[in-house]
Amino acid sequence: MKEKLQRFMYGRYGLDSFGKFTIIVSLVLMLLANFVPARLGSVLSLLCWALLIYTYFRMFSRQTYKRACENQAYLAKTAKVRHFFASQKSIMAQRKTHHIYKCPTCKQKIRVPKGKGRIEIRCPKCNTTFIKKS
């Protein structure tokens, strides 16, 4: 069965970031359709089905260049949002081992290891020194 699916999908585009986004949006619309008035719910349900059909159309498409261009356009439009969340995730991961301070002069972020006591920190950008507890 797995081999048949692999043979069927050979040369087809498959699932990408934009496809995952459209599936998530359609699932959210499906959930919202259950909690809103009937008239609006039917419109949301119709939109949900349209998104799912479009997603499957993209997955089974053999025009891989066009689908890749659509995905690149989506990634370009969401780059700032994805970068913000990636940087927040990185900061949260570093919180266990480091403090992150901002320079009082230039607002440059400076990463200092935890557990060193009161230390003098020199900003690498403007050379301002300030004292903080690490």
Image: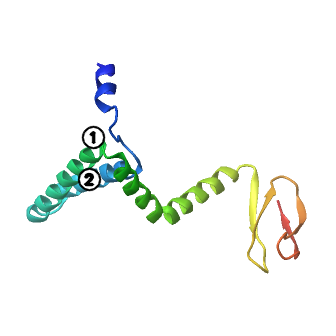
Quadrant where the N terminus sits is top left
Callout 1 secondary element: helix
Instruction: Tell me which residue sits at (57%, 56%) in the image.
Output: 86
Outermost left residue: 39
- The image position of residue 106, as x and y in percent, is 77, 79
Which quadrant would residue 108 be assigned to in this image?
bottom right
Q: Which residue is label 2 attached to?
A: 26
Amino acid identity at mark 2: Ser
* Residue 101 versus residue 32 in the image, above or below: below
Residue at (59, 54) in percent of width and height:
89
User: Do the CB atoms of the residues marked 2 and 1 lie less than 8 Å apart?
Assistant: no
Q: Which residue is mark 1?
A: 60
Which residue is more in the foreground, 110 or 1? 1
Return the residue nearer the eye: 65 or 85: 65
Give the quarter of the image for residue 125. Answer: bottom right
Across and down, in percent, residue 119 comes to 90, 63
